[in-house]
Amino acid sequence: MSRTKLPDIMQSRQVVVAGAGVAGLTAALALAARGFGVRIYERSPVLQEVGAGLQLSPNATRILDGLGVLDHVMPMAVRPEAVVLRDAATLIERARVPLGNHAERRWNAPYLVVHRADLQKALLTRVAQVPEITLATGTAVTSAAPRAGTLAISIEKDGTGSETEAELFVAADGVWSSNRRLVGPGERSRFSGELAWRTTIALDSEAGQQFEAIASTDCVTTFLHSGFHMVAYPVRAGSAINLVAFTPGKAIAEQWSGEADPDDLKRAMRGTAPALLRLVDVAGTWTIWPLHTVDASKPWTTERMALIGDAAHAMTPFAAQGAAMAIEDAYTLAAALASAAPLGEWEAARKQRVSKVARRGALNHLAWHAAGPVALARNLFLKTRSPQGLAADMDWLYGWTPPGWSDAEL
Ligand SMILES: Cc1cc2nc3c(=O)[nH]c(=O)nc-3n(C[C@H](O)[C@H](O)[C@H](O)COP(=O)(O)OP(=O)(O)OC[C@H]3O[C@@H](n4cnc5c(N)ncnc54)[C@H](O)[C@@H]3O)c2cc1C
């Protein structure tokens, strides 16, 4: 890796970003839009198609639009018509939150579902169009330390270490971040006690037909049950359905796709409608993802460094906001750095928002896994709510705009 000495004025605008996930790539685009030069280092030699579906609510898609990414996302994304809650035992619909045109009118941006790999590809396509950003894959950031008014940043490629310089460092290195220790006391992520079981089925397969018999292919459907819940929605331009089921489980290796035995999943689904159990059988290979969280109350910043996305606050996905929070972090951090506001102010504001979202996720989990009389009370409550009323409950989350946001800003 060559090190060129830049003129002082440019040197002062250089930022290093660790990680080319959703947070790191969005941060690079937001920073470049505000005049920073950005070098992204990504540990993986190849950005593989690992992962499955992600939900992108309007609070995130309006930012992606502002950064010129949404046009690249749209061809592979799906705009679902509604979020539907169904009883997993009876398949009865319990609630419906309208999305589609309704979401776009209500929150001024689309609600989308997309495969993680398609979102990453869209971000990479946009990054390649911006000359102020460079991306080096197969290169890990291993450390960063203040030195004479700047930062000395250690990187490693093919087992060989070298050093580079920047004024600012953004660690977007995910839930198992090794750079988190640079801003605080080496806090590790914690296993949440939940496993996510994932698979993707082609719509024109036997599994696709089985799915169509029990739920709509143009909605986000959540099946409710005391022992698990399952979320299903279309991805890959509607040609496939992403299935993800959440059960309690034991910690496994820290990875995105471990081996899974579907019989364990079916045990957790005892009492479920036979059609849903059959779907598990015909769906093909399931992988398991152990859900880890990061205590968001720990420090995220120093004078010249910031953690964003899962590195700062990985949360359980029960509010479907992991990617959206990473996108919000990235955009707001770039604005804070451009205005030279103390990073502590940005951190305090983001912590408030992120902890409210995490609390909403915990509430969803409680409601979706309710049993006996509590489940009956939940169902009665949902019956009293109109679809529009349920949508209005989400205004604080999906209607959010970054401070000082203007649609014409970028
Ligand atoms: C492979 C993968 C699959 C995923 N699948 C799903 C999914 O199906 N559904 C879902 O809801 N969420 C998924 N997620 C998580 C989701 O992407 C995040 O919750 C959210 O988008 C926030 O992303 P992030 O950029 O903070 O972290 P991540 O998306 O985890 O990105 C972090 C990036 O940093 C890189 N990195 C790690 N250490 C270093 C280092 N020292 N130096 C440089 N680079 C480093 C990693 O290789 C990775 O590319 C997945 C994440 C990954 C990495």
Image (tube, rainbow, N blue to C red):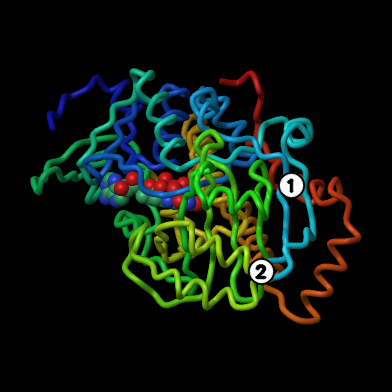
Q: Quadrant of the N terminus?
A: top left
Q: Is 74 left, or right, of 40 in this rendering? A: right
As rendered, which of 166 and 54 lies closer to the eye? 54
- In the rendering, which numbered label is found on residue 41? none
As rendered, which of 107 and 299 lies closer to the eye? 107
How many labels were placed on the picture? 2
Q: Is 6 left, or right, of 185 in this rendering? A: left
Residue furthest out toward the bottom: 372
* Residue ID for mark 2: 273
Residue 226 found in image quarter: bottom right
Mark 1 secondary-structure assignment? helix
User: Eyeballing the image, is 321 above or below 331?
Assistant: below
Q: Who's the residue at 52% across and 60% down the image?
A: 315
As rendered, which of 42 and 242 lies closer to the eye? 242
Residue furthest out toward the front: 206
Q: Is 362 left, or right, of 43 in this rendering? A: right
Q: Identity of the amino acid at label 1? A: Trp
Q: Who's the residue at 34% across and 21% down the image?
A: 132
* Residue ID for mark 1: 396
Q: Quadrant of the C terminus?
A: top right
> Percent position (x, y) of residue 249?
46, 76
> Percent position (x, y) of residue 98?
77, 43
> Percent position (x, y) of residue 35?
42, 21
> Percent position (x, y) of residue 51?
41, 49
Circle 1 or circle 2, nearest the eye: 2
Q: Residues within 10 Å of mark 2 (few under 14, many from 20)?
A: some
Tag 1 near tag 2, CB within 8 Å: no
Q: Who's the residue at 71% across and 75% down the image?
A: 370
Nearest to N terminus: mark 1 or mark 2: 2
Mark 2 secondary-structure assignment? loop
